[in-house]
Amino acid sequence: MTHRRLGALAALSVAATLVVSVLIGSPASAATVTYGQDVSGYQGNVNWSAQWNAGSRFAYIKATEGTYYTNPYFAQQYNGSYNIGMIRGSYHFAIPSDSGGATQADYFVNHGGGWSKDGKTLPGALDIEYNPYGATCYGFSQANMVNWIRAFLNQYYARTGRWAVIYTTTDWWTTCTGNYSGFWANSPLWIARYSSAPGTLPAGAPTWSFWQYSSTGPFAGDSNQWNGALDRLKALACNGTC
């Protein structure tokens, strides 16, 4: 997610999904995708009815950062997107230099990052990317960064029974983890690339699950795609329990 936001800090048919694709005019090709967005405290109170009418069907909401910040608009954004009919989840902006991975996973779960088997709640996401406050890799070696991420994922799984989604860029992942390939068997990849295609993925990732393709619309916050039809997104939310 962008430093700008950080600092200020019923299923649709395949045909309907493709119609949304045409109306929004995003970088998608002929493949079936579902559109959504992510927001943070920078967006304030979001008009979720307008977002729904514009074609957004899912939302990720910033809940926490490090162990020192919670989004003051989290309740309005998280509950508002849910109440309008979206599938929604929350994300944590990682600051590895602040505290350990397990500690930050606990802070995330304790402040809105949990998961419930209601069919409309996505697993939490770990936003791990360029350091907006200093050294790109937070002063960590590649091995230590992999260990930090592993500690976060394992603790999140222990607390929720779900593996967290990982949001990153291929460049940061390559630079700061050595292009580590060991997490993608469990954690869906949320790739960030503002372009006409997701581009090269981190090593070992079989595909992208979410793609953040624009920070300038059409939706509030950042605009995203889910790599599939809405029923498959619901399946991720359900985790086989609904």
Image (tube, rainbow, N blue to C red):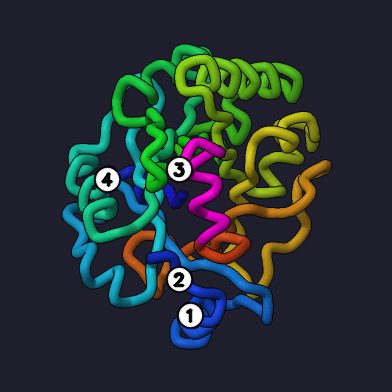
Magenta stretch encompasses residue 24? no
Q: In which quarter of the image is residue 142?
A: top right
Q: Which mark is residue 12?
A: 2
Q: Position of residue 139 (x, y in %)?
A: 61, 22
Residue range in magenta is: 231-242
What residue is shown at x 47% (from left), y 67% (from top)?
A: 35
Type of amino acid under label 3: Leu
Q: Relative to 175, is 72 on the left or the right? A: left
Q: Which mark is residue 213?
A: none
Mark 3 touching mark 1, by CB under 8 A?
Answer: no
Mark 1 touching mark 4, by CB under 8 A?
Answer: no
Q: Position of residue 127 (x, y in %)?
A: 51, 38
Q: Earlier in the sequence, mark 4 or mark 3?
A: 4
What secondary structure is found at the residue carrying circle 3? Answer: loop
Mark 1 touching mark 2, by CB under 8 A?
Answer: yes
Q: Earlier in the sequence, mark 3 or mark 1?
A: 1
Q: Relative to 27, is 60 on the left or the right? A: left
Which mark's residue is nearer the viewer, 4 or 3?
3
Q: Name the residue under label 3.
A: 122
Q: Relative to 237, is 229 on the left or the right? A: right
* Structural distance between the alpha carbons of marks 2 and 3: 18 Å
Quick one: label 2, few (<14), some, or many (20+) residues within 10 Å? some
Q: Relative to 10, is 51 on the left or the right? A: left
* Structural distance between the alpha carbons of marks 4 and 2: 21 Å
Q: Mark 4 points at which residue?
A: 78
What secondary structure is found at the residue carrying circle 4? Answer: helix
